[in-house]
Image (spheres, helix red, strand yellow):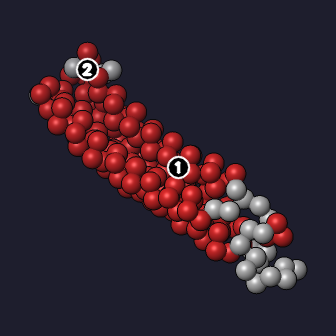
Amino acid sequence: MSATNPATPEYGPFFGVMGAASAVIFSALGAAYGTAKSGTGISAMAIMRPELIMKCIIPVVMAGIVAIYGLVVAILIASSLKSASDGYTLYLGFIHMGAGLSVGLAGLAAGFAIGIVGDAGVRGTAQQPRLFVGMILILIFSEVLGLYGLIIAVFMYASNST
Protein backbone atom coordinates (compact mmCIF):
# COMPACT_ATOMS: atom_id res chain seq x y z
CA MET A 1 0.00 0.00 0.00
CA SER A 2 1.35 3.35 -0.96
CA ALA A 3 -1.14 5.33 1.14
CA THR A 4 0.52 6.42 4.38
CA ASN A 5 -2.66 7.46 6.20
CA PRO A 6 -4.77 4.50 7.39
CA ALA A 7 -7.93 6.62 7.02
CA THR A 8 -7.32 6.97 3.27
CA PRO A 9 -6.43 3.52 1.94
CA GLU A 10 -6.08 3.03 -1.81
CA TYR A 11 -9.27 1.00 -1.95
CA GLY A 12 -11.40 3.71 -0.27
CA PRO A 13 -12.79 5.20 -3.50
CA PHE A 14 -13.91 1.72 -4.58
CA PHE A 15 -16.80 1.92 -2.13
CA GLY A 16 -17.85 5.32 -3.46
CA VAL A 17 -17.82 3.98 -7.01
CA MET A 18 -19.86 0.97 -5.90
CA GLY A 19 -22.34 3.34 -4.26
CA ALA A 20 -22.80 5.30 -7.48
CA ALA A 21 -23.12 2.09 -9.48
CA SER A 22 -25.58 0.59 -6.99
CA ALA A 23 -27.77 3.67 -7.15
CA VAL A 24 -28.13 3.45 -10.92
CA ILE A 25 -28.19 -0.33 -11.30
CA PHE A 26 -30.79 -1.17 -8.67
CA SER A 27 -33.08 1.76 -9.38
CA ALA A 28 -32.92 1.06 -13.12
CA LEU A 29 -33.75 -2.60 -12.48
CA GLY A 30 -36.78 -1.53 -10.48
CA ALA A 31 -37.85 0.91 -13.18
CA ALA A 32 -37.39 -1.72 -15.89
CA TYR A 33 -39.48 -4.25 -14.00
CA GLY A 34 -42.19 -1.67 -13.31
CA THR A 35 -42.25 -0.60 -16.94
CA ALA A 36 -42.34 -4.16 -18.29
CA LYS A 37 -45.00 -5.39 -15.89
CA SER A 38 -47.20 -2.32 -16.35
CA GLY A 39 -46.64 -2.43 -20.12
CA THR A 40 -48.00 -5.96 -20.37
CA GLY A 41 -51.08 -4.86 -18.45
CA ILE A 42 -51.53 -1.89 -20.78
CA SER A 43 -51.25 -4.18 -23.79
CA ALA A 44 -53.91 -6.49 -22.40
CA MET A 45 -56.13 -3.56 -21.45
CA ALA A 46 -55.79 -1.97 -24.90
CA ILE A 47 -57.54 -4.91 -26.51
CA MET A 48 -60.74 -4.22 -24.58
CA ARG A 49 -60.58 -0.42 -24.23
CA PRO A 50 -58.10 1.19 -26.66
CA GLU A 51 -59.34 4.70 -25.79
CA LEU A 52 -57.82 4.33 -22.28
CA ILE A 53 -54.24 3.71 -23.40
CA MET A 54 -52.94 7.24 -22.79
CA LYS A 55 -54.76 7.50 -19.48
CA CYS A 56 -53.30 4.20 -18.25
CA ILE A 57 -49.70 5.01 -19.20
CA ILE A 58 -49.21 6.62 -15.77
CA PRO A 59 -47.66 3.51 -14.13
CA VAL A 60 -44.95 3.44 -16.81
CA VAL A 61 -44.14 7.12 -16.19
CA MET A 62 -44.01 6.55 -12.44
CA ALA A 63 -41.66 3.61 -12.90
CA GLY A 64 -39.35 5.80 -14.97
CA ILE A 65 -39.20 8.38 -12.20
CA VAL A 66 -37.67 5.76 -9.89
CA ALA A 67 -34.68 5.48 -12.23
CA ILE A 68 -34.24 9.26 -12.12
CA TYR A 69 -33.88 9.07 -8.33
CA GLY A 70 -30.96 6.69 -8.70
CA LEU A 71 -29.41 8.79 -11.44
CA VAL A 72 -29.50 11.93 -9.29
CA VAL A 73 -27.76 10.23 -6.38
CA ALA A 74 -25.19 8.59 -8.67
CA ILE A 75 -24.31 11.98 -10.15
CA LEU A 76 -23.94 13.48 -6.67
CA ILE A 77 -21.64 10.65 -5.59
CA ALA A 78 -19.64 10.62 -8.82
CA SER A 79 -19.09 14.37 -8.65
CA SER A 80 -17.38 14.04 -5.26
CA LEU A 81 -15.21 11.02 -6.08
CA LYS A 82 -11.48 11.56 -5.93
CA SER A 83 -8.42 9.42 -5.36
CA ALA A 84 -7.28 8.29 -1.95
CA SER A 85 -4.17 10.44 -2.28
CA ASP A 86 -6.46 13.47 -2.67
CA GLY A 87 -8.08 12.74 0.70
CA TYR A 88 -11.00 10.43 -0.12
CA THR A 89 -11.42 8.60 3.17
CA LEU A 90 -12.73 5.11 3.76
CA TYR A 91 -15.51 6.59 5.87
CA LEU A 92 -16.64 8.79 2.98
CA GLY A 93 -16.57 5.76 0.68
CA PHE A 94 -18.83 3.87 3.07
CA ILE A 95 -21.20 6.84 3.32
CA HIS A 96 -21.42 7.03 -0.47
CA MET A 97 -21.97 3.30 -0.74
CA GLY A 98 -24.73 3.49 1.87
CA ALA A 99 -26.38 6.37 0.03
CA GLY A 100 -26.25 4.49 -3.27
CA LEU A 101 -27.63 1.31 -1.76
CA SER A 102 -30.36 3.28 0.01
CA VAL A 103 -31.77 4.84 -3.14
CA GLY A 104 -31.01 1.81 -5.30
CA LEU A 105 -32.70 -0.84 -3.18
CA ALA A 106 -35.63 1.46 -2.34
CA GLY A 107 -36.01 2.09 -6.08
CA LEU A 108 -35.93 -1.64 -6.76
CA ALA A 109 -38.71 -2.22 -4.23
CA ALA A 110 -40.73 0.72 -5.55
CA GLY A 111 -40.37 -0.51 -9.13
CA PHE A 112 -41.62 -3.95 -8.17
CA ALA A 113 -44.61 -2.44 -6.37
CA ILE A 114 -45.40 -0.09 -9.25
CA GLY A 115 -45.22 -2.95 -11.73
CA ILE A 116 -47.59 -5.19 -9.82
CA VAL A 117 -50.06 -2.42 -8.98
CA GLY A 118 -49.85 -0.96 -12.49
CA ASP A 119 -50.49 -4.30 -14.18
CA ALA A 120 -53.50 -5.17 -12.05
CA GLY A 121 -54.74 -1.58 -11.97
CA VAL A 122 -54.86 -0.96 -15.71
CA ARG A 123 -56.48 -4.34 -16.34
CA GLY A 124 -59.08 -3.54 -13.70
CA THR A 125 -59.61 -0.04 -15.09
CA ALA A 126 -60.49 -1.56 -18.45
CA GLN A 127 -63.34 -3.45 -16.80
CA GLN A 128 -64.39 -0.76 -14.29
CA PRO A 129 -63.18 2.79 -15.10
CA ARG A 130 -64.00 4.00 -11.56
CA LEU A 131 -61.05 1.94 -10.33
CA PHE A 132 -58.65 4.46 -11.92
CA VAL A 133 -58.49 6.85 -8.95
CA GLY A 134 -57.80 3.98 -6.54
CA MET A 135 -55.05 2.72 -8.81
CA ILE A 136 -53.42 6.16 -8.86
CA LEU A 137 -53.51 6.39 -5.06
CA ILE A 138 -51.86 2.99 -4.64
CA LEU A 139 -49.27 3.92 -7.27
CA ILE A 140 -48.44 7.05 -5.29
CA PHE A 141 -47.90 4.96 -2.17
CA SER A 142 -45.65 2.66 -4.19
CA GLU A 143 -43.68 5.54 -5.67
CA VAL A 144 -43.07 7.12 -2.29
CA LEU A 145 -41.00 4.08 -1.30
CA GLY A 146 -38.39 5.18 -3.82
CA LEU A 147 -38.70 8.76 -2.63
CA TYR A 148 -37.89 7.67 0.92
CA GLY A 149 -34.68 6.08 -0.33
CA LEU A 150 -33.81 9.27 -2.22
CA ILE A 151 -34.36 11.40 0.88
CA ILE A 152 -32.12 9.20 3.02
CA ALA A 153 -29.44 9.05 0.31
CA VAL A 154 -29.36 12.84 -0.11
CA PHE A 155 -29.29 13.30 3.65
CA MET A 156 -26.37 10.88 4.00
CA TYR A 157 -24.53 12.51 1.13
CA ALA A 158 -25.08 16.09 2.29
CA SER A 159 -24.32 15.59 5.96
CA ASN A 160 -21.02 13.76 5.43
CA SER A 161 -19.48 15.03 2.19
CA THR A 162 -16.35 17.08 2.31
Compared across the picture, whether 139 is left or right of 74 comes to: left
Circle 1 residue: 70
Circle 2 residue: 52
Q: Work out whether residue 68 can be spotted.
A: yes
* 86, above or below 126, in the image: below
* 1, above or below 61, in the image: below
Determine the residue positioned at 12% across, 28% down.
130
Q: Where residue 11 appears, x then y in whole percent? A: 74, 74
Q: Quadrant of residue 121?
A: top left
Which residue is more in the foreground, 48 or 58?
58
Which residue is more in the foreground, 149 or 105?
149
Compared across the picture, whether 46 is left or right of 88 comes to: left
Determine the residue positioned at 68% across, 62% down.
162
Dot 2 surroundings within 10 Å: few (below 14), some, or many (20 or more)? some
Q: Where residue 14 appears, x then y in whole percent? A: 70, 68
Which residue is more in the foreground, 40 or 107?
107
Determine the residue positioned at 44% across, 44% down.
66
**Residue found at the far right of this picture:** 2
Q: Quadrant of residue 81?
A: bottom right
> What is the CA distance from the residue labelled 2 to the residue labelled 1?
30 Å
Q: Work out whether residue 104 can be spotted.
A: no
Q: Secondary structure at mark 2?
A: helix
Compared across the picture, whether 132 is left or right of 1 comes to: left
- Foreground label between 2 and 1: 1
The amino acid pointed to by label 1 is: Gly
Q: Where residue 102 appears, x then y in whole percent? A: 47, 61
Q: Secondary structure at mark 1?
A: helix
For marks 2 and 1, the one nearer the N-term is: 2
Q: Where residue 92 appears, x then y in whole percent? A: 65, 69
